[in-house]
Amino acid sequence: MLLNRFLNPVIHLFAPQPWLAVFLSMAISIVLLTWVLLPVAARLLKRWLDPVEGSRPAVNLTGIAVICAGYVASLAVFAVVPVLQLG
């Protein structure tokens, strides 16, 4: 959502063709997810992702609750902050 809101207008300045803009947007998002966000998420969720430590039901339920709370929080931020809305 953040890339769509803030990065796409910049990409369209350099790549006015829709096919090129989509390609660049996807390439940038894949790079950010793979090398920036995924290592951070893996560190934060290591206990839940570890097959030995994460095998207990309490750890699994806590991990599920954290993920769901993150989704609810991000949706709430995008619903409330006007600058993040595309309309």
Image (cartoon, helix red, strand yellow):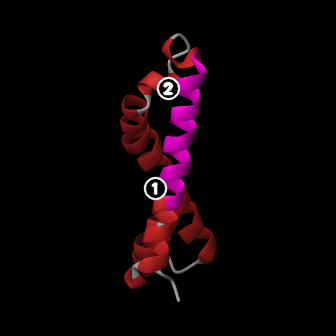
Q: Residue at x 48, y 81 (%)?
A: 85
Against 23, residue 46 (above or below) is above
Task: Judge by depth and name the residue closer to the eye, 30 or 50.
Answer: 50
Against 42, residue 79 (above or below) is below
Separation (CA) of disc 1 from disc 2: 28 Å
- In percent of width and height, residue 50 lies at 50, 18
Quadrant housing residue 26: bottom right
Q: Secondary structure at mark 1?
A: helix
Quadrant housing residue 10: bottom left
How many C-alpha atoms fall within 10 Å of the one at disc 2: few (<14), some, or many (≥20)?
A: many
Badge number at residue 48: 2
33 falls in the magenta region: no
- In percent of width and height, residue 12 lies at 47, 78
**Residue kind at label 1, given as amino acid type:** Ile
Q: Secondary structure at mark 2?
A: helix
69 falls in the magenta region: yes
**Bounds of the magenta segment:** 56-72
Residue under numbered circle 1: 28
Residue 46 relative to residue 71: left or right = left
> Taking the image as drawn, is residue 27 in sight?
no
**Residue kind at label 2, given as amino acid type:** Trp
- In percent of width and height, residue 16 lies at 52, 81
